[in-house]
Structures are given as C-alpha cells and as structure tokens.
Image (tube, coloured by chain):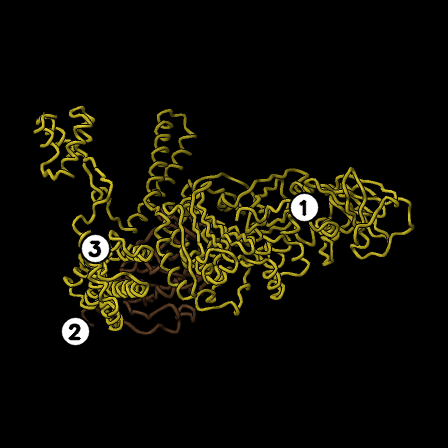
Amino acid sequence: MTATVTENSSQQFTTFKVDGFLFGVEVESVQEVIRYQEMTRVPLAPGSVGGLINLRGQVITALDLRHRLGMRERPEGQLPMNVVVRTEDGAVSLLVDQIGEVIETDLVHFEPPPDTVSAAARELVRGAYKLDGALLLALDVARVVEV
Amino acid sequence: MNQMDEIVQEFLVESHENLDQLDTDLIALEQEPGSRPLLGSIFRTIHTIKGTSGFLAYSKLEAVTHVGESLLSRLRDGELVLDPEMTSALLEMVDAVRGLLSSIEANGAEGDPDHTDLIARLTALQSPPSQDAAAVPVQRQTDDDEAIQPEEPAVVEVVIPRLGEMLVQSGVAAPTDVLAAVLDQTLGGDSRKLGEILVSKGRAQQSEVDTALETQGETRRSVSDSSIRVDVDLLDALMTLVGELVLTRNQIIQHAATREDADLVRSSQRLNLIASELQEGVMKTRMQPIDSVWSKIPRVIRDLSLTCGKQVRVEMEGKETELDRTILESTKDPLTHLVRNAVDHAIETPAERIAAGKDPEGLLLMRAFHEGGQVNIEITDDGKGIDPAVIGAKALEKGLVSPDQLSRMTPREIVNLVFLPGFSTAAQVTNVSGRGVGMDVVKTNIERIGGTIDVQSVVGRGTTFRIKIPLTLAIIPALTVTCAGDRYAIPQVSLLELVRLEGEAVTAGVEQIQGAPVYRLRGNLLPLVYLDRELAVGPGELDRQRDTLFIVVLQADDRQFGLVVDGVCDTEEIVVKPLGKQLKGIPSFAGATILGDGKVALILDVLAVAQRSNVLLTGRERGVGDRGLRGETAVSEVESLLIVGLGEGRRMGIPLAMVTRLEDFPLDTIERVGSREVVQYRDQILPLIRLSSFLGTGGYGEPSPTVQVVVYSENGRSVGLVVEQILDIAEQAITARSDLDSHGLLGSAVVQDHITELLDVRQAILAADPNFYLSAPADLAGV
C-alpha cells in the first residue's frame, strides 16, 4: 500500500500565475494552453464567465480565474491567456495572467492551503506544494468550473 | 464498458433491435393469432437470443427465453392457440429479457432479478387445459395436412433472379424463355441454375451467360451488404465537421466576393455547391423514420387499454416520415403522454361507446407528414372529446382566466387552455396518466425543440392534437443582428418581418402605453422589447438617441412583439452549438454559433426573451385574454373609430371595420319578436340591440322619432346596434388604453381628448343574434 502511494506521489502540474499567485493544474486534465483569444461576452452570465471563445470550431466557455478566486480585476490592457481544461461536461478555458512551466513535484511537499490565500480561493484549492522559493497552489478544477 | 467483448456488444445491439420488433410482432399476432409468418419470426428471434445467451453463459437469460421458446414452438406447431393471457406472458418475457440485457449492458452481468414466477407461468401455459385435449389431435391433423405444403400460397409468386433480368436486358434471352426457366425451377423442381436451364434448352449461349454472371458478381449487393451500422458519436462528429466546413465555405464566399478573381469565384461557387450537398447528405444520415419511436406505441396502448378495460385500435400513417434523431428522441415523451391521455381519458369504455352509438373499439390515429420544412404529427382519437364548457369552468375555478376573458374566447381557444400550467388537477390523476406531468409539460417539451402544439376537439366525436416540429436543430437559418457592439443570431423560424424607422419616425413611431413602449404596426399595437435593456448591456432607454430604429418583429407563443436592435446584418445558415453548463441557467440564449468571420455569437431564445421582458405574461391570464383582443383588432385592421354617444355623456368607439352602414329607422317601424326588437331592412329581418341597455346605461335622453342604428353585416347576416347619436369618426391614434374589466367592453382610451369606451363588438353582436357567427364554425372543422 505504502509502496503504491510513493510510486504515484510524483505529480506533474501545468502552472500559471493569477494576481501574483502560482497555481497549478494536473497536466492530465489540461487539453492545451493558448494565447489570448477574442471573446464574445455573455450578457446575464455569472460574473466569472469571461466570455465564449472559438476553439477550432468548438464554442468554449472561458472562466475568469481572477473573478472566480475573488481577486482584484485584471489591469486594463492586460490580456489573459487560456488554459483549456477537460471536464466531465466538455472543455472549459481558464483565463490566467501568465503561463508558467510544467513542474514536477511530490506529495511529500503537499500541505493544506496557507492562510494567505483568500477564503474564496481556499474553497477551490486542494492544497499547496512547497517548491524551492515558491508555493504552488493546486486548483480543484472540478470545483472551479462549478460556477 | 470499454473492455466489453465485441461479441457481447454485437449481441446487445442486435437483441435490442429484435426485441422492439418482437413487441410489434406479438401485438400484431394478437390480431391474427394463426399467422405463421409472425409466429415463425417471433420464434426465431427468441431462439437466437436463447442460443447466444447460452453460448455467452448468461444462464438467467437462457432460462427465461427457453420457456418462452417452448411455448412459442407449441404455438407455432398449432398445438396451442394464442390467447391474451399468453400474449401478456410473452410480452412480460420480452420485458424480462430487455431488463436482463440492460443490466448486462450497464454492469456486464445479469444482475439478480427473480423470474421464477414468470417461468412458472410460461411453463403452465404450455400444457393445454384438459377439456381441450380432444381437440388437440384434430388440430394437429389439419396442421399436418397443411404441413405438406406449408407456405404454398394459392398464387405463385415468381421472383425473376437478377441474372434473368440481365439476360433479358442484354438481349441474350427472351423474357418468355427466362420466365419458363424460372417456372421450371420453382414449380417443376428443376434444381439446376437458371443459366444452365437456358443453355440446355438452347435459349442462350454459354459464353453469354458467363459474361452476365461475371457482371452480376460485380453489381450484386444484398441488403446486408448495402447497409452498415455506424456509431452515433461518429455521425455527430461528422455533423460537427460538416458544420465547420459550411462556416469555412461562408468565409471563403465572403472573401471571394471582395476579390476580382474569376477563378476564385468559380471555385468558391463549386465549393458552395459541394458543401451544401455534403451537408444535406450528412444530415440525412442522422434522419430516422418516426417509426422508431412509434413502434413502441402499440404496446403501450395494449397494456393501457387492458388496464382501463377499453378496446383501442391504433392506426398509423406516415411511419416512414423522417426526423433528426435528436428531435425524434425528444418527441418520445410528449407523444407517449398524449397517447396515454387519449386512452385513459378520451376514449370511452366499450359500454359507453355502444351507448353513444359508436364502434365499441376506439380508434387512435397517428399521422405524420412533412409540410413546409416541418414535420406535422397528429394524434386523433374518436373518444368523447374535450368539452369547452367543462374546461372553461375548470379554468375559472383555478383562476387561470377571468369570467370576462372566458366569455370572449372561442371554443377552440378554451380547449387550448388545457396547456396552461396549473391546469392539470389532482382529481384527474390516475395511475395511468396525469402522474404529475401536465399538458403544459408536453407543450414546454415541444416548444423546447422549436415546435408548436394545438388541440381541436368536438364533443362526442373526438380530439386531435397537432404538433409541428422542425426537421433538424443542428443547422438553422438565422438572422444576425447587432446590439451594443455584439452580434446575436435569431432563428428565422420566429421571424415575421423587419421594420426600419428613420428620422422623425424614430421618435414619432414609438408610443408609450402605461410606460410600455409600443409600435403601431398596420393598426396593431406591437409591444417593443429593447434587446440591450433585456440583456443589460446598454441603456436601452427610449430617450437614447437613435438615428435609425430597427424593429425585428417576432412571433413567440402565439404573440407578436418587436425586438429593437442596433442593426440588422444578414441571414445565414448557422450551426447550433450547445452552451457549457456554466451558461445553461440563462434562458435567454438557445445556444451559440460561429459566424462567417470565425467569431462566436449567441443565439437568442425568442420565447425566453419575450417571457423575460413580460411581453408574454408567462402565457397565463394576459396571454389568454389578450388573444381575444388581438383577434378583434386584427379583424378591424384600422385605427379609425366610429364615435357614438350612448346618453349620460358616454362615448363609445366602434372600429370602423365593424361598421357596414349607418341607418335611421323611424321608431314605429321597430317590431318585436319575442323579447327582441327587430326591423325590416332590405328584405331581411334585422335584429336590433340597444347598446345602452346592453351596457347597462340608463335610457337615452329625449325620445326621438327615429333611432340611429349602426349596421354590421357578415356572411349575409346583419345586426343593428342602436345608439343615441353618431358623433364622429376619429382617425387619430389612440394614445392610452386601459383595461376596464367591464362587461361588453374591451377597455377605454382617450380619443379627441375625451375618455372613450371601446366596444366589444363581437359580444354586442352575439347579444343581438346569438347565432350570428354560427354560420362559419371554422374552429371545429377538420377534426
């Protein structure tokens, strides 16, 4: 049993920054990462919905992670990037500030989310991985897309 | 599921198809219990399932099908004759098999259902009752006689093989020679091949036959070769790709139009053509005959009519009518509900039917046909019909309509009240239908797929439900409009017309009635909805400066309204894409699409927009009441009113279209017939009604030697409305209208600075002559 956990405890994350925080999503659930896409706004939609994008003929909902995580609004003129994740109900794009690299980390570095993270964000974060000089917040994608 | 053995998968698919066929066959068999082809087919199906389940070691499935097969074999051999009890047991067996198969599909195992009862019953049914024992051998005797030439019909049907046809076509052999050879084969027992017979008789050359045989080998395609099973997901994926292709085509066409490149234009036109054909072809692959849903209906009806103690025959027309499978799927529940309702509520018991002079067996007719790019489905029963009086009383009791509204409604409108939410009552609930699902749900489901439903009924004769649904939902023609910088697509099916106001007309054309903006469209008041305001994306205020006003006139749920947008772009075919679940909660959008330039646009759900803006008050009180009013104004089609005085300073407006002539009659020409006043007028008897007494005003002022009468004629009938004086004809616009809940009135308005009541002419006419409109009972025709 213990052996199995150790074997699977290594985890790869696609990382990105949102309002200065480093977030990560398991690479398996990421479909692709793309630059800024023109969006069509959706009137009457929940505030976290940034708009709709055309992903090679698919209409995909883009969720603004800043809004979703209860953070400050993205400064004027700064264009978000898209992290397209697979969910049970099809692909959803997460709007982030900046794309980071793919980081491999291990469960031994895992701990519950720190207090510095806002309450709204803590709901959507599974926990944190201590990296060298940084803290990687692992997003719970399934919850993030439950708008 | 993914690891499921291919054989099992195949077995499941095949068995499910066979089971549907089995249901149909068993019910058909009940009608003609002796039919050998039917019995044979049923037996084979069960036999196949039994065999395969034994091979795949599904022991429960094997046990159930085994007893069923035994019973069937005795039926087939004529040892037993099918009775309703056996049919029920066999149908139950089919259900048991279906349950086991579903369980295998879902869990990979048969699960744990207990079928011992069923097996015992099926076994018991195999032993014939003892008093019939003597009859059995006789029965067998006749069967044995038949068995000698079991399937030899009186008329020999000769099938000319393909080779024969080819030989005739290529002139190698004469038609008569081929026929003679075929007859030798079928009747004479000549076992040689057709070609051999012909050659041996010297009617054809061996070499020629060989050539023909070769060609035949190339061209022959049996039924099993010419059709294949295709995964629905694959078809959906293809559909998506074709959708993309159509969009790319649109882009290229737009692009080509701006270039002066003849080659490019030519190629793009070809592309256009091919893409359209491809689109059509792929759409066809998704089409399924409506029979795939209907085939389940006879079984439903059989079970239900047994439970209710009724006899119902179902007839189907247009089973082959094709529909997109997604739409077909969503018609299933509404159709089943309507059919259940018809059997449960509409069709009477045999005793009642006989008492009413009808065939004890009720008829349920289902028809489907294409018309105007839509599929029409009709469900007609010859039951007791829907009584408008009963429906009206119930609607009143439930507070769904006011007595005044009800009095203005036609019988047909009243019958259609059954679709109002809240109409279904607990008293109606039986275990058969009315299980909390009302007719309003049926209507909602039909409307969700862009369809409409309507009911017509004649008391004592029956009811017809008429459903119209679009052929496909995947690709629809739509109008794109702009609003606050974004583009939106409006399905063309709800579009009636476009109105464009410029300059002064922008401010002059839009009026306010009780704070709600309206536009006067050919005399009818069209409520306006500002899209930017509805979507909360712009000011949307009336005082917002617009140079041009675009009004998209839309039809939603029997009502019209004008949607004010910033601009109108284009009509194009759009591919409907679903919205993610994050946006499912917004009713205003039916989906999204990708426009020719690759950008995403939202598709408006016209009905939802109308409801959100309160143009349709959720289809309740106002939706119903106003329909009568709208009907009235639609008849008049004018803004001109005849203004009359009724004494006591009351002014009354009568639409000029409801005025045929104005007459003066001397008082002494008025005669009385019963309690009515009449006057001889143009060789007819003209019934008169005094509007003052009809509307409850006191008498007229000074008695004058003559009376002023407004005559209205229609279909050769006339009535006269007696007024005190004719005042004027008002051409001006009615600037305010309030709903007075008063007998005989449509409301009141300010005309020429005076409060003027608007007469409900229809009611007044009916008061004078109750039979006035009966000459054209168009509402009930066609049931």
User: Circle 1: is it few (<14), some (14-19), or many (20+) Cα within 10 Å?
Assistant: some
Q: Mark 3 sits on what residue? A: B142
Q: Mark 1 sits on what residue? A: B633
Q: Which residue type does callout 1 highlight?
A: Thr
Horizontal side, residue B404 vs residue B332: left or right: right
**Outermost residue, bottom direction?**
A2
Query: Looking at the colours in the rendered structure, which chain would you say is drawn in yellow?
Result: B
Horizontal side, residue B645 vs residue B628: left or right: right
* Label 3: chain letter: B
Query: Looking at the colours in the rendered structure, which chain would you say is drawn in brown?
Result: A
Viewer-nearest of discs 3 and 2: 3
Which residue is pictured at 21% across the width and 55% down the height? B142
Q: Mark 2 sits on what residue? A: A3
Percent x, y of residue B714: 69, 41
Percent x, y of residue B568: 53, 40
Kindly state the secondary structure of the residue where label 1 is placed: helix
Q: Which residue type does callout 3 highlight?
A: Thr
Kindly state the secondary structure of the residue where label 2 is placed: helix
